[in-house]
Amino acid sequence: MAEATPGVATGADGAAGHQPAEAQSGLTGVTRTFRVFKGVPGGEAGYATYQVPEVVGMVVLDAIHHIQRTQDGDLACRWNCKAAKCGSCSAEVNGHPVLMCKTRIDTLPEGTITVQPLKSFPLIKDLVTDVSRNYETNKLIPPFTAAPDDGEPWRIQQMDIDRLFEYRRCIECFLCQDVCHVNRTHELSARFFGPRFFVRVASLEMHPKDVLDRRELLAETGGLSLCNITKCCTEVCPEHIHITDNAIIPLKERVADVHWDPLRWVARRLRGAPKAGST
Amino acid sequence: MTEPFVTRDCDVLVVGAGGTGMRAAIAAAEAGCSTLVVSKSLLGKAHTVMAEGGIAAAMGNVDSPDSWEVHFADTMLGGQLINNWRMVDLYSREVIDRVRELERWGGLFDRTDDGRIMQRAFGAHSYRRLCHVGDRTGLELIRTCQDRMVHTAGADVRMECTLTRLLTGPGGVVGAMGYDRNTGEFVVIRAKAVVLASGGWGRMYRYTSNSWEGTGDGAAMAYQAGAELQDMEFVQFHPTGMIWPPGARGILVTEGVRGEGGILRNAEGERFMERYDPIKLDLSSRDVVARSIYKEVEAGRGTPHGGAYLDIASQRTPAEIRRKLPSMVEQFEALAGVDITREPMEVGPTIHYTMGGIRVDPETGASSVPGLFAAGESAAGLHGANRLGGNSLGDILVFGRRAGEAAAELARSRAGFADFSAAEVSEEQEAVLRPLAGGEPGENPYALHQALQEAMQDDVGIGRSEESLRRALGAIAELRERTTRMRVGGGRVLNPGWHACQDMRFMLTVSESIIRCALERRESRGSQWRFDFPEKDDRLARVNLVVRDHEGTMAVEERPVELMPDEVVARLNRSRFFDPANLPSHYAGKVEPRPVEAH
């Protein structure tokens, strides 16, 4: 057996071999106070307070993990990629719906940082809510459908891809569903798809190869007209999708074409067959 | 004593809801089987979303000389010829159809000027080959499969449920059991066939691009059920992870940055890849680039936080960078305060992918345990000793589909459900509940996890030696003993501390298998870099290492690499990077020199 070179085998942790521990830890010397919601439905609920030593570039999710590791092992939060690409760690920080993995604490005002679960969804425990109704909504939307005789390989222009890519950037963090007052204040989610699924429908409706028409669905089941374009969804979108301008308003225009056209309305009443988009 | 549990029956159980699991479920449900997908997370959050660069498929839309044969040769050479050649063969042929299929399901791809699917350059691929949409290809794949699956009759999903054990009977696997993460309720699922699509394992390392889910549950459960794990020593360090700030360390920086023209420099401004791979340069294979960065840092030429600079700002305009790499722009701006359209990024190796996994039949994904299939990152064979970028998204589509179809075929041939053993269920329940038993304060699972990460990162990292591996094996034994005393507060309702206890069991089994295989492979090959055996060993070019449970201890065995027939070996010269000097003796003289390229 050959001896390993001393100092090489033990420093074999990727690229950090020569860095002193302090330089790598990045502690700023500041301690931040976190006030975090804890509780379950029907049980005890309230806020617990924790002190967390700040590290350079620390995000709220880092702080929650620190609390779990060192102070409160059963504090529940949802997370996955920790890189703002999966949309799991949605919560309300100082009252704002955000991704915890993307919210640096050095961007928050001095003083206590308050972390709460999303308000518009039923609580499961601590920072975790039941977002399953979003998955039910998605099932109501007919999937992408191409003409069966549209042979491959397809030719599509980059311009079309660029437009669709904005919608497809959505990571389903549901912050838009949380902030939307139709859900949040008026609790109308049962008859309102919500911003995320208007984006979803837009991505299908504007795909050059899709042949279905979902406009009546939007008007009837989707509750598109409940949206009064306050743009709160656009403001909280971590992917910077122009939800209102590029998804909701174009859909409203398309729906108006078929659903609110008085002549078509009369025709529908006479025929009794509400088939949209037959032109 | 048996705790209450809910039961559920399905023809095909799919463990995991990343690209592999969803593609397998679509295949099984389309074949007429009731199919249940069990996911630890919400649907659409799996690690597949972190795959950014694209899907490698030799469509030849950009570089017309490309073909599946060239892709075959690149993949075999990248894997140092210990890949299962039949898997590579199926893969390089079929992945083209899988990309077209994804497009037909609504998946988006960037386009060429004449409207065909655009392809970008990637490490150790002979031609521009990666079909992509910006730097979000994994998200696009998962969203497309997700939408397809939820609208496929017969496919159902159970989210936020952890499976901890495969249930076995005399005829093989009969189902699986676990618990609902949100309620703590036990779940027992009877199935006629099980597909493991549970991904890889990086969480036993300190710096990893993996999410919390990458704990090796599938491999550990398969091992416990008697399956063989192969090539476990091969763990991929992606050369470019973020290294600063500390909380962001390990987060992936896509190879697409280099694919789009980005270059690596050391602290002295040298383009150091000229020293390590003058032909492929920054787009060398990942094992080579990761080691090169490591060596630069060791030589004192590292950046302030111990890595290398990755510079795209000097190579492309800000508009181009924003269009082709939008999430990299966002990631560095939000997390590091760095504008990559103007400044270089600081990067270093991060644990990213596991080439090893469950040993499977190349065509069906069947493991050595009847009724148990595996595909994607949880299976071994396609990537050999090192995976090429872009081959994972292709892998999950090609072999996810194949495993789903094969599992459905087996399920249809079975008349009914086999019974599980009540004793097995109660034994597992007892193990799962032990950390909640109260009594004396015990070991903290978070602290044990951290100790495991220290041991694996320091001693089983990018480079290993007999000495470091033996030390790690000692650490594993000690940790295993300490896990018997884990205790956590709280109850069964959504308790992350309790969940962390289950993760430790899986990670210890998988970590031990990595170490044992790394010890036996006394050579450097692909991602396995032994400081004490820096060269390749010709004999080991014909060997895959396998571990399996042998009466409670982990046995390591050698299995012969299935050798390529002569007409297949002859294909290797189709790769632009073919070098006859690198052929092992058993293939020597069987490959013609590379013909001069006609232009």
Image: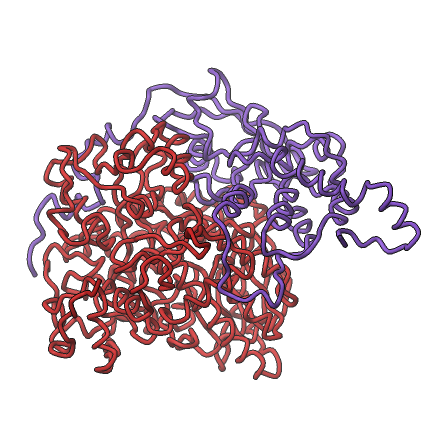
Chain colours: A purple, B red
Q: Quadrant of the C terminus of chain B?
A: bottom left
Residue drawn at point x = 35 percent, y = 62 percent = B60
Name the residue nearer the viewer: A50 or B127. B127
Q: Is residue A114 left or right of residue B83?
A: right
User: In the orientation shown, which residue stands out farthest toward the right?
Assistant: A270
Residue A209, quarter of the rendered image:
bottom right
Residue drawn at point x = 71 percent, y = 38 percent = A253
Q: Is residue B214 left or right of residue B23?
A: left
Pinpoint residue B445: horizontal percent, then vertical percent: 41, 46
Rendered position, A270 above or below A263: below
Residue drawn at point x = 39 percent, y = 45 percent = B443
Q: Quadrant of the N terminus of chain B?
A: bottom right
**Residue B206 in view (yes/no):** no
Pinpoint residue B348: horizontal percent, then vertical percent: 25, 41
Rendered position, B238 above or below B94: above
Name the residue nearer the viewer: B296 or A112. B296
